[in-house]
Every structure is written in C-alpha cells, then in structure tokens.
C-alpha cells in the first residue's frame, strides 16, 4: 500500500485444471516497441446534496504486464490517496475518499510513460491463480448449454489447441457484427454480456470477448479478458479521450498466455474504406488475421478479469470489469465524474 501526499513519483494447459501452473514465466515473443507519454485526468464534477461520504477508484497502468514497461508515474491529487492492489489479480487502484464539504470539482491526474512491445505469439507471464478460476462461468461470461453446443460445433474436426482457438476466432467474427460498423442500428450492452451477444449478434469489444471467453471455457480452455486503452494514432497530442478497449488471452500449457483481439479482427474483416479508415485512426494493421495470437504495441493495460471486486471493496455487486474508474457516494454508484486519457508518442 502507498499512502500519498499531494504528488508521488515512481521510477522506473500444462497441468490439470485446479492446480496452479507455477515456475518461471514462459519466454514472451515480441516485435517492435513503441513509447508513449500519457496523462489520465479524473474529475469529480458533482456530488449528491447532503452526501455523507464518497469513494473513488481510478485506473492505474499495470506494472506486472510483461509487454509493457511503466515509468515516470506521477500522481497529483488535492486529497490524500492510496495505491491499492488486489493480490489475486494484480489489478491496482488509485483510491481516493472525498469527505462532505469538499470543494468541487476534484481533479486527480496520473501521468506515466508506456514502453510497449508488439506481442507475436505469446506473452511471457506465469499464471497466478489455479486454472479453475479461468474456466468458471460468471454473470457476464456465461457458460450454458447453448454455449457448449456452439463451441463443440465450431471446433468440430479440429485437434490442436491453435486449430480450436482459431476456429473460435473465425466463428465469433462470423456470428457477430462490431457495433461501430452501424452506430445507428447496432448497440452494446455496456456490461459485456455473453447473453447479449448471443441474442443481438452485436456489441463492443466486451461482448466479443465475453462470447469468445464463454466458448473457451465451454471447451475447458482457460481464458481471461484484459482491459486497457488504445493509443489512437490520429489522436496523438490532442485533448481527446482514448476511451477504452479490451482483448483476450487464453492459456496454452506449452506457451503461456496467448493474446487475441477478435473485435479488431471483425473491424477489419471486410476490405474497404471502413477498414482502411480505422487502421489509419488507430495506426494498426488492416488485417483480420493479424489479431489472432498477435497484438500491436499501441495499447496500455489497466486491468484483467471480469466480475471484479475492488480494493477496498465497493459496497455494490462485483463490477462487470474495471477500466477508467468507479465512484460511489453513500454506498451507491455515482456518475458525476469524467476521465480523459491523452498521450504523445515518443519518436525515435
């Protein structure tokens, strides 16, 4: 735990299910690296009349992500804060309490540098929990009879793990349509629900990876969703929020955690102006198959997992995921706050 004053500068399927896979990390496979200087700005703009207490958890970049190196992390806050960590997931939280009578707005900033490597096949990280924990159904990533039947059909005739996971990748791209392709007609649930994906055949990155994760789990393949943000090339140096993005990793006992981004695969499924424009927006490859077992370097990881509890624990139910932040007032979720993530790419 770190308790901070106003500013802080920090430098710098082998084995059966149910048994932790321990030992040294598998070596990662990486390509080119890129460096970005980022600023995360959180602003609590309003509070309910007569509130008795407010608590806020804001995102921090993960330091246990092998593909990224975080340095020059600086937190500035008008209120005392703590950096808290969940020992099981490794997720970190910038925790701030806002007492009654605090003058608003409250602005908290986190600046940091990200040196991120392109992942080419596998990320060099050991598993930290039992494999069972990555195969359990939860309220968001659901495993039911419909999912089991879908998964079995999708991988029919496939024998190796790579063949099966690629078959699932192609199946999800064929089953769903990324909501950004038609924002007037297609919508996301906002919670990343497998059931929504099954019913609506659309959603954002959380729906895509909820469905993919459910199919993996139905086949006994451990998987987890990773949440972060893209450093969008077109927004380099601009005062515009990067929003958030998620992707998925599945566990290969021979290699370790293997990444994919089936939502971006779907984004580039059909050649044309739409795919080209998004490749230019993000500064990433215009190739639907690139995002199977590979990830570009224009991202930052903030958290892992679904159905999460924070540290200290929030009063409500487990969160569908944690990115950007979460604020509650008198034990109830409070939405009177904003987050703006901006960046500059470091050239050379």
Image (cartoon, helix red, strand yellow):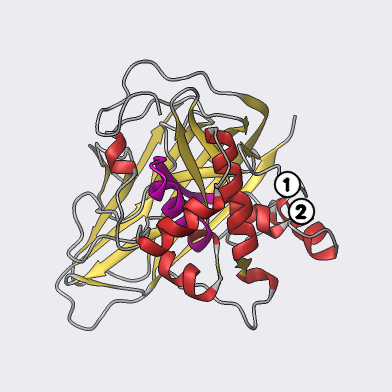
Magenta residues (range)? 207-229
Total marks drawn?
2
Above/below status of 161 relative to 106: above
For marks 1 and 2, give the CA distance. Answer: 5 Å
Answer few, some or many: residues within 10 Å of disc 2's Cα (few below 14, many 20 plus, some between 14 and 19): some
Q: In which quarter of the image is residue 35?
A: top right
Horizontally, residue 87 falls left or right of residue 295, namely left
Q: Which image quadrant is residue 263 in?
A: bottom right
Q: In this view, does 285 lie to the left or right of 189?
A: right
Residue 134 in percent (x, y) is at: 34, 42
Q: Where is residue 69 in the image (x, y as percent from the top left)?
A: 51, 30
Please state which of residues 102 and 242 is positioned toward the viewer in this rendering: 242
**Which of disc 2 and disc 1 is earlier in sequence?**
2
Q: Is residue 242 visible?
A: yes
Farthest residue, direction top: 24
The spot of residue 57 in percent (x, y) is: 31, 56
Q: Do the residues labelled 1 and 2 touch (CB within 8 Å)?
A: yes
Which residue is situated farthest in the front direction here? 157
Q: Pick the residue in front: 172 or 120.
A: 172
Residue carrying label 1: 284
The residue sitting at 29% across, 33% down in the picture is 17
Q: Is 65 a magenta residue?
A: no
For the point 34% across and 71% down, the residue is 104
* Residue 191 appears in the rendering: no
Q: Where is residue 38 in the image (x, y as percent from the top left)?
A: 56, 46
State the mark number for residue 279. 2
Q: Dividing the image into 4 quarters, which one contains the C terminus?
A: top right
Q: Dot 2: what SS?
A: helix
In which quadrant is the N terminus drawn? top left
Judge from the rendering whether residue 275 lies leftward or rightward of residue 333; answer left or right.
right
Observer-nearest of 142 and 188: 142
């Amino acid at each position: 735990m770190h308790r901070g004053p106003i500013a802080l500068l920090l430098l710098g399927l082998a084995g059966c299910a149910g048994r932790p896979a321990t030992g040294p990390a598998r070596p990662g496979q990486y390509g080119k690296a890129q460096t970005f200087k980022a600023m995360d700005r959180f602003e609590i703009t309003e509070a309910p009349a007569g509130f008795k207490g407010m608590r806020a958890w804001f995102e921090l970049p993960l330091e246990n992500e092998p593909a990224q190196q975080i340095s020059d992390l600086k937190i500035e806050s008008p209120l005392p804060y703590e950096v808290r960590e969940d020992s099981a997931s490794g997720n970190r939280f910038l925790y701030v309490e806002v007492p009654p009578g605090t003058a608003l707005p409250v602005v908290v900033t986190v600046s940091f540098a990200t040196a991120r490597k392109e992942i080419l096949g596998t990320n060099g990280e050991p598993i930290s929990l039992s494999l069972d924990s990555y195969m359990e159904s939860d309220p968001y990533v659901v495993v039911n009879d419909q999912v089991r039947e879908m998964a079995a059909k999708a991988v029919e005739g496939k024998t190796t793990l790579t063949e099966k996971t690629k078959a699932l990748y192609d199946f999800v791209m064929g089953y769903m349509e990324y909501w950004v392709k038609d924002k007037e007609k297609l919508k996301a649930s906002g919670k990343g629900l497998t059931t929504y994906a099954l019913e609506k055949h659309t959603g954002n990155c959380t729906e895509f990876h909820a469905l993919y994760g459910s199919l993996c789990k139905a086949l006994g393949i451990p998987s987890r969703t990773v949440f972060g943000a893209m450093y969008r090339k077109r927004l380099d140096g601009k005062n515009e929020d990067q929003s958030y993005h998620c992707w998925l990793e599945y566990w290969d006992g021979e290699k370790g955690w293997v990444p994919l981004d089936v939502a971006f695969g779907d984004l580039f499924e059909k050649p044309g102006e739409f795919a080209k424009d998004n490749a230019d927006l993000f500064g990433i490859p215009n190739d639907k198959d690139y995002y199977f077992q590979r990830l570009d370097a224009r991202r930052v990881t903030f958290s892992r997992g679904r159905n999460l509890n924070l540290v200290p624990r929030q009063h409500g139910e487990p969160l569908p995921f944690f990115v950007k932040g979460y604020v509650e007032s008198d034990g109830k979720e409070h939405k009177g706050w904003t987050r703006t993530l901006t960046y500059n790419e470091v050239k050379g």
